[in-house]
Image (spheres, rainbow, N blue to C red):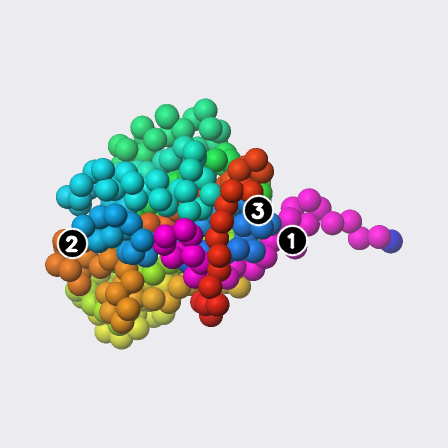
Amino acid sequence: MTNRVSSHDRATLDMPFPRLSEGRFSSYAALTDDALYEKTGVRIAFTQRTGGVSEPPFDSFNLGGHVGDDPACVSRNRDILLEGIGAPDAFVIQPNQVHGDRVVVCERRQDVETCSARAREGADGVVVRASDVAAILCFADCVPIIAVSPAGSFAVVHAGWRGVVAHIAEKAVDMLCAADGVDASAVNVYIGAHIEACCFEVGEDVAARFANEFGACALARPRHVDMTAALVAGLASHGVDTRRIACAHVCTMCDSEGRYYSYRRSAGVCGRHAAAAVRVSQDERSGASCRSNDAMPL
Protein backbone atom coordinates (compact mmCIF):
# COMPACT_ATOMS: atom_id res chain seq x y z
CA MET A 1 0.00 0.00 0.00
CA THR A 2 1.36 3.45 -0.90
CA ASN A 3 1.91 5.73 2.06
CA ARG A 4 0.17 9.06 1.70
CA VAL A 5 2.00 12.20 2.80
CA SER A 6 -0.17 15.06 4.03
CA SER A 7 0.44 18.61 2.86
CA HIS A 8 1.58 19.45 6.40
CA ASP A 9 4.08 16.58 6.45
CA ARG A 10 5.34 17.53 3.01
CA ALA A 11 5.88 21.14 4.07
CA THR A 12 7.72 19.98 7.17
CA LEU A 13 9.93 17.64 5.18
CA ASP A 14 10.76 20.44 2.75
CA MET A 15 11.50 23.03 5.44
CA PRO A 16 15.28 23.37 5.82
CA PHE A 17 16.73 23.09 9.29
CA PRO A 18 17.76 26.53 10.57
CA ARG A 19 21.26 27.84 10.10
CA LEU A 20 22.45 31.32 11.03
CA SER A 21 25.35 32.78 9.09
CA GLU A 22 26.58 36.29 8.49
CA GLY A 23 25.42 37.87 5.25
CA ARG A 24 26.26 41.20 3.67
CA PHE A 25 23.25 43.34 2.77
CA SER A 26 24.44 46.43 0.91
CA SER A 27 26.20 48.54 3.59
CA TYR A 28 25.53 46.33 6.61
CA ALA A 29 26.10 42.83 7.92
CA ALA A 30 23.42 40.71 9.57
CA LEU A 31 22.82 37.14 10.64
CA THR A 32 20.40 35.46 8.26
CA ASP A 33 19.34 32.11 6.77
CA ASP A 34 19.61 31.94 2.99
CA ALA A 35 18.11 28.44 2.71
CA LEU A 36 15.01 29.60 4.56
CA TYR A 37 14.64 32.52 2.17
CA GLU A 38 15.01 30.31 -0.89
CA LYS A 39 12.34 27.93 0.40
CA THR A 40 9.77 30.25 1.95
CA GLY A 41 10.53 33.76 0.71
CA VAL A 42 11.00 34.85 4.33
CA ARG A 43 14.09 36.99 4.78
CA ILE A 44 15.27 37.31 8.37
CA ALA A 45 17.96 39.67 9.62
CA PHE A 46 19.59 40.13 13.00
CA THR A 47 21.42 43.40 12.45
CA GLN A 48 24.63 44.67 14.04
CA ARG A 49 25.59 48.23 14.96
CA THR A 50 27.53 49.22 11.82
CA GLY A 51 26.39 50.23 8.35
CA GLY A 52 24.08 53.14 9.15
CA VAL A 53 24.20 56.92 9.44
CA SER A 54 23.71 57.65 13.17
CA GLU A 55 26.34 59.62 15.07
CA PRO A 56 27.88 58.61 18.43
CA PRO A 57 26.78 57.38 20.90
CA PHE A 58 24.22 55.76 18.58
CA ASP A 59 26.69 54.93 15.84
CA SER A 60 25.83 53.88 13.42
CA PHE A 61 22.98 51.52 12.50
CA ASN A 62 20.53 52.47 15.24
CA LEU A 63 16.96 51.30 14.58
CA GLY A 64 15.46 52.54 17.87
CA GLY A 65 13.44 55.74 17.69
CA HIS A 66 13.13 56.14 21.45
CA VAL A 67 16.77 56.52 22.51
CA GLY A 68 17.45 60.19 21.71
CA ASP A 69 18.94 59.73 18.23
CA ASP A 70 18.11 62.11 15.38
CA PRO A 71 14.76 60.85 13.98
CA ALA A 72 16.01 61.49 10.44
CA CYS A 73 18.94 59.14 11.03
CA VAL A 74 16.69 56.44 12.47
CA SER A 75 14.35 56.76 9.49
CA ARG A 76 17.25 56.52 7.04
CA ASN A 77 18.64 53.49 8.88
CA ARG A 78 15.26 51.77 8.61
CA ASP A 79 15.24 52.47 4.87
CA ILE A 80 18.76 51.00 4.60
CA LEU A 81 17.58 47.89 6.46
CA LEU A 82 14.58 47.35 4.19
CA GLU A 83 16.51 48.08 1.00
CA GLY A 84 19.18 45.60 2.00
CA ILE A 85 16.75 42.73 2.57
CA GLY A 86 15.04 43.39 -0.75
CA ALA A 87 11.85 44.92 0.62
CA PRO A 88 12.19 48.70 0.15
CA ASP A 89 8.45 49.21 -0.23
CA ALA A 90 7.30 46.87 2.52
CA PHE A 91 4.77 48.00 5.08
CA VAL A 92 6.38 48.10 8.52
CA ILE A 93 5.10 47.16 11.96
CA GLN A 94 7.42 48.38 14.72
CA PRO A 95 5.81 48.15 18.16
CA ASN A 96 6.28 50.14 21.31
CA GLN A 97 8.11 47.51 23.34
CA VAL A 98 7.05 47.33 26.99
CA HIS A 99 8.70 44.16 28.36
CA GLY A 100 5.38 42.36 28.42
CA ASP A 101 3.90 39.31 26.71
CA ARG A 102 1.44 40.91 24.29
CA VAL A 103 1.63 39.67 20.70
CA VAL A 104 -0.25 41.31 17.82
CA VAL A 105 -1.21 39.52 14.61
CA CYS A 106 -1.32 40.93 11.07
CA GLU A 107 -3.32 38.62 8.80
CA ARG A 108 -3.44 40.76 5.63
CA ARG A 109 -1.75 43.80 4.16
CA GLN A 110 -5.03 45.65 4.58
CA ASP A 111 -4.68 45.13 8.34
CA VAL A 112 -1.30 46.85 8.70
CA GLU A 113 -2.63 50.20 9.87
CA THR A 114 -4.86 48.63 12.51
CA CYS A 115 -2.14 46.24 13.64
CA SER A 116 0.44 49.03 13.83
CA ALA A 117 -1.89 51.11 15.98
CA ARG A 118 -2.34 48.20 18.38
CA ALA A 119 1.41 47.58 18.42
CA ARG A 120 2.09 51.21 19.30
CA GLU A 121 -0.13 50.79 22.36
CA GLY A 122 2.44 48.29 23.64
CA ALA A 123 3.53 44.89 22.36
CA ASP A 124 6.64 42.72 22.36
CA GLY A 125 5.73 40.31 19.60
CA VAL A 126 4.35 40.51 16.08
CA VAL A 127 2.97 37.64 14.00
CA VAL A 128 2.72 38.37 10.27
CA ARG A 129 0.90 36.20 7.72
CA ALA A 130 0.93 38.66 4.79
CA SER A 131 3.64 39.15 2.20
CA ASP A 132 5.54 42.44 1.94
CA VAL A 133 4.81 43.31 5.58
CA ALA A 134 7.93 43.63 7.73
CA ALA A 135 8.17 43.39 11.51
CA ILE A 136 11.09 45.21 13.13
CA LEU A 137 11.85 44.98 16.85
CA CYS A 138 14.79 46.56 18.68
CA PHE A 139 17.33 45.28 21.19
CA ALA A 140 20.36 46.12 23.32
CA ASP A 141 20.89 43.04 25.56
CA CYS A 142 17.36 41.56 25.48
CA VAL A 143 16.72 38.43 23.43
CA PRO A 144 15.66 38.73 19.76
CA ILE A 145 13.64 35.76 18.51
CA ILE A 146 12.25 34.99 15.06
CA ALA A 147 9.99 32.00 14.38
CA VAL A 148 9.05 30.94 10.85
CA SER A 149 6.32 28.55 9.73
CA PRO A 150 6.63 26.31 6.65
CA ALA A 151 3.70 28.30 5.22
CA GLY A 152 5.80 31.47 5.21
CA SER A 153 4.21 33.23 8.17
CA PHE A 154 6.54 34.44 10.91
CA ALA A 155 6.79 35.96 14.37
CA VAL A 156 9.35 38.45 15.66
CA VAL A 157 9.65 38.67 19.44
CA HIS A 158 11.42 40.86 22.00
CA ALA A 159 12.11 39.05 25.27
CA GLY A 160 13.74 40.64 28.26
CA TRP A 161 13.99 38.48 31.35
CA ARG A 162 10.38 39.30 32.21
CA GLY A 163 9.27 38.25 28.74
CA VAL A 164 11.21 34.99 28.96
CA VAL A 165 9.59 34.16 32.31
CA ALA A 166 6.18 35.14 30.87
CA HIS A 167 6.77 32.71 27.98
CA ILE A 168 6.24 35.29 25.25
CA ALA A 169 8.27 33.24 22.73
CA GLU A 170 6.14 30.15 23.34
CA LYS A 171 2.99 32.26 23.13
CA ALA A 172 4.05 33.67 19.76
CA VAL A 173 4.86 30.20 18.40
CA ASP A 174 1.47 28.92 19.61
CA MET A 175 -0.28 31.81 17.83
CA LEU A 176 1.77 31.27 14.67
CA CYS A 177 0.93 27.57 14.60
CA ALA A 178 -2.77 28.19 15.24
CA ALA A 179 -2.92 30.75 12.44
CA ASP A 180 -1.20 28.49 9.91
CA GLY A 181 -2.56 25.14 11.10
CA VAL A 182 0.90 23.63 11.56
CA ASP A 183 2.58 21.76 14.39
CA ALA A 184 5.20 23.49 16.49
CA SER A 185 7.63 20.75 15.47
CA ALA A 186 7.59 22.18 11.94
CA VAL A 187 8.57 25.71 12.94
CA ASN A 188 12.09 27.12 12.70
CA VAL A 189 13.17 29.33 15.61
CA TYR A 190 16.15 31.69 15.55
CA ILE A 191 17.65 33.29 18.67
CA GLY A 192 19.90 36.28 18.04
CA ALA A 193 22.69 37.89 20.04
CA HIS A 194 21.80 38.97 23.58
CA ILE A 195 23.37 39.20 27.01
CA GLU A 196 24.55 35.69 27.84
CA ALA A 197 24.92 33.92 31.17
CA CYS A 198 28.57 34.97 31.41
CA CYS A 199 27.48 38.58 31.96
CA PHE A 200 23.83 38.32 33.03
CA GLU A 201 24.08 38.39 36.79
CA VAL A 202 20.74 38.96 38.52
CA GLY A 203 19.31 39.15 42.02
CA GLU A 204 18.43 36.06 44.01
CA ASP A 205 14.71 36.63 43.41
CA VAL A 206 15.05 36.71 39.62
CA ALA A 207 17.36 33.69 39.65
CA ALA A 208 14.80 31.79 41.73
CA ARG A 209 12.03 32.66 39.28
CA PHE A 210 14.03 31.23 36.39
CA ALA A 211 14.93 28.08 38.32
CA ASN A 212 11.31 27.55 39.34
CA GLU A 213 10.00 28.17 35.83
CA PHE A 214 12.59 26.33 33.72
CA GLY A 215 14.65 24.16 36.05
CA ALA A 216 18.35 24.06 36.79
CA CYS A 217 19.29 24.56 33.12
CA ALA A 218 18.33 28.23 33.40
CA LEU A 219 21.20 28.98 35.80
CA ALA A 220 24.73 28.64 34.43
CA ARG A 221 26.03 29.32 37.93
CA PRO A 222 24.52 30.99 40.99
CA ARG A 223 22.69 34.20 39.98
CA HIS A 224 23.84 33.95 36.34
CA VAL A 225 20.77 33.38 34.18
CA ASP A 226 21.05 31.54 30.85
CA MET A 227 18.15 32.96 28.84
CA THR A 228 19.01 30.82 25.81
CA ALA A 229 18.67 27.63 27.85
CA ALA A 230 15.43 28.88 29.40
CA LEU A 231 13.98 29.70 25.98
CA VAL A 232 14.99 26.36 24.49
CA ALA A 233 13.42 24.53 27.45
CA GLY A 234 10.23 26.54 27.19
CA LEU A 235 9.94 26.16 23.42
CA ALA A 236 10.60 22.42 23.62
CA SER A 237 7.81 22.09 26.18
CA HIS A 238 5.47 23.63 23.59
CA GLY A 239 6.44 21.12 20.93
CA VAL A 240 9.27 22.88 19.10
CA ASP A 241 11.89 20.44 17.80
CA THR A 242 15.19 21.50 19.38
CA ARG A 243 16.91 20.66 16.09
CA ARG A 244 14.89 23.54 14.67
CA ILE A 245 16.29 26.12 17.08
CA ALA A 246 19.36 28.04 15.87
CA CYS A 247 21.21 30.27 18.33
CA ALA A 248 23.75 33.01 17.64
CA HIS A 249 25.63 32.30 20.90
CA VAL A 250 27.04 35.83 21.01
CA CYS A 251 26.98 37.94 24.17
CA THR A 252 26.10 41.55 23.43
CA MET A 253 27.89 42.78 26.54
CA CYS A 254 31.29 41.13 26.18
CA ASP A 255 31.51 40.49 22.42
CA SER A 256 35.18 41.14 21.71
CA GLU A 257 34.39 42.80 18.38
CA GLY A 258 31.77 45.15 19.83
CA ARG A 259 29.35 44.32 17.03
CA TYR A 260 26.17 44.91 19.02
CA TYR A 261 24.64 47.57 21.22
CA SER A 262 24.60 46.77 24.94
CA TYR A 263 22.52 48.72 27.43
CA ARG A 264 24.55 47.42 30.35
CA ARG A 265 27.95 47.98 28.76
CA SER A 266 27.12 51.57 27.79
CA ALA A 267 25.33 52.50 31.04
CA GLY A 268 22.02 52.90 29.23
CA VAL A 269 23.13 55.31 26.48
CA CYS A 270 23.27 53.51 23.14
CA GLY A 271 21.37 52.66 19.98
CA ARG A 272 19.43 49.52 19.21
CA HIS A 273 20.10 46.71 16.76
CA ALA A 274 17.12 44.89 15.30
CA ALA A 275 15.51 41.60 14.51
CA ALA A 276 13.56 41.96 11.29
CA ALA A 277 11.59 39.64 9.04
CA VAL A 278 9.53 39.97 5.89
CA ARG A 279 8.09 37.53 3.39
CA VAL A 280 9.14 39.00 0.09
CA SER A 281 6.55 38.54 -2.64
CA GLN A 282 7.61 36.75 -5.81
CA ASP A 283 7.50 40.04 -7.73
CA GLU A 284 10.01 41.61 -5.36
CA ARG A 285 12.32 38.66 -4.71
CA SER A 286 14.53 39.32 -7.72
CA GLY A 287 15.58 42.56 -6.02
CA ALA A 288 16.79 40.95 -2.82
CA SER A 289 20.59 40.98 -2.75
CA CYS A 290 22.38 39.23 0.06
CA ARG A 291 25.94 38.07 -0.38
CA SER A 292 26.71 35.49 2.30
CA ASN A 293 30.14 35.51 3.84
CA ASP A 294 32.05 32.37 4.73
CA ALA A 295 30.74 32.44 8.29
CA MET A 296 30.68 29.33 10.38
CA PRO A 297 27.20 28.02 11.12
CA LEU A 298 26.06 29.21 14.51
Residue span colored magenta: 2-30
From mark 1 to mark 3, how far is it between C-alphas?
Answer: 10 Å
Q: Residues within 10 Å of mark 1 (few under 14, many from 20)?
A: few
Mark closer to the observer (1, 3): 3
Name the foreground residue: 272 vs 152: 272
Of mark 1 and mark 3, the one earlier in the sequence is 1
Mark closer to the observer (3, 2): 2
The image position of residue 242, as x and y in percent, is: 50, 62
Q: Is residue 211 above or below residue 68?
A: below
From mark 1 to mark 2, how far is it between C-alphas?
Answer: 44 Å
Name the foreground residue: 119 vs 260: 260
Quadrant assignment, res 180: top right
Q: Amino acid at mark 2?
A: Pro
Q: Residue at x 32, y 34 (%)?
A: 119
Q: Is residue 76 visible?
A: yes
Cβ–Cβ under 8 Å for marks 3 and 2: no
Q: Residues within 10 Å of mark 2 (few under 14, many from 20)?
A: few
Residue behind mark 3: 40
Residue behind mark 1: 14
From mark 3 to mark 2, how far is it between C-alphas?
Answer: 37 Å
Q: Residues within 10 Å of mark 3 (few under 14, many from 20)?
A: some
Q: Residue at x 28, y 69 (%)?
A: 257
- Which label belongs to residue 57? 2
Q: Amino acid at mark 1?
A: Asp
Residue 14 on the magenta span: yes
